[in-house]
Image (cartoon, rainbow, N blue to C red):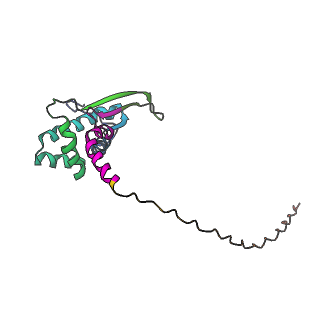
Amino acid sequence: MRHNKSGRKLNRNSTHRKAMFKNMARAVFTHETIRTTEAKAKELRGVVDGLITMALKNDLHARRQAFKVLGNHKLVQHLFDNVGPRYAGGQGGYTRIVKLANVRAGDAAPMVIFELTKLAEKKAEAAPSEAPKAEAKAEEVAEKPAKVAKPKAAKPKVDKPKADKPKAAPKAPKAKKKAVA
């Protein structure tokens, strides 16, 4: 019996399940949105929310615990410096699961999009805030004479004579064996 045994097994052993959730958590913090099955997403929610809660603590012990899951110092730094501060002052609700209409073609598993609720701002939105700096750089560039790229000279093509290959002699027809009666 499974008394007090929480969590889905997902038809995997414990080490495979643990590795799968680590990989999926890495993908979530790298891309901020992934496509997976509904059952996996519901289980992944606990892993990702726990990591973001660690990022809100922002101490050395939390960083070391996050490294145990993510296994990459740059991802841990991204989590604590970029993702964690987005959720400062919040009480959970860090992830969102959006169900897709179509099921997976191979086994008809219900598919979802798993994403962080507060996605990173796009670079296009960040560009207007840096517009004065860009204008100043544009003026500096305008003062300098523009460099003109020289066109590359085309190399003349040399026609190599094709070597005449000797034609293979036609094969002689095989002699048919006579049936012995």
Give the quarter of the figure containing the C terminus. bottom right
Residue closer to the observer: 133 or 35: 133
Q: Residue visible at 20% across and 36% down?
A: 86
Residue 136 highlighted magenta (yes or no): yes
Give the quarter of the figure containing the N terminus. top left
Left or right? Give the position of 161 relative to 46.
Answer: right
Left or right? Give the position of 153 relative to 110.
Answer: right
Please report the bounds of the magenta region as a residue range.
Answer: 113-142
- Quarter location, residue 58: top left
Q: Residue visible at 25% across and 39% down?
A: 129
- Predominant SS along the magenta part: helix
Residue 1 highlighted magenta (yes or no): no
Residue closer to the observer: 35 or 149: 149
Q: Is residue 71 visible?
A: no
Left or right? Give the position of 48 relative to 98.
Answer: left
Q: Is residue 87 visible?
A: yes
67 above or below 176?
above
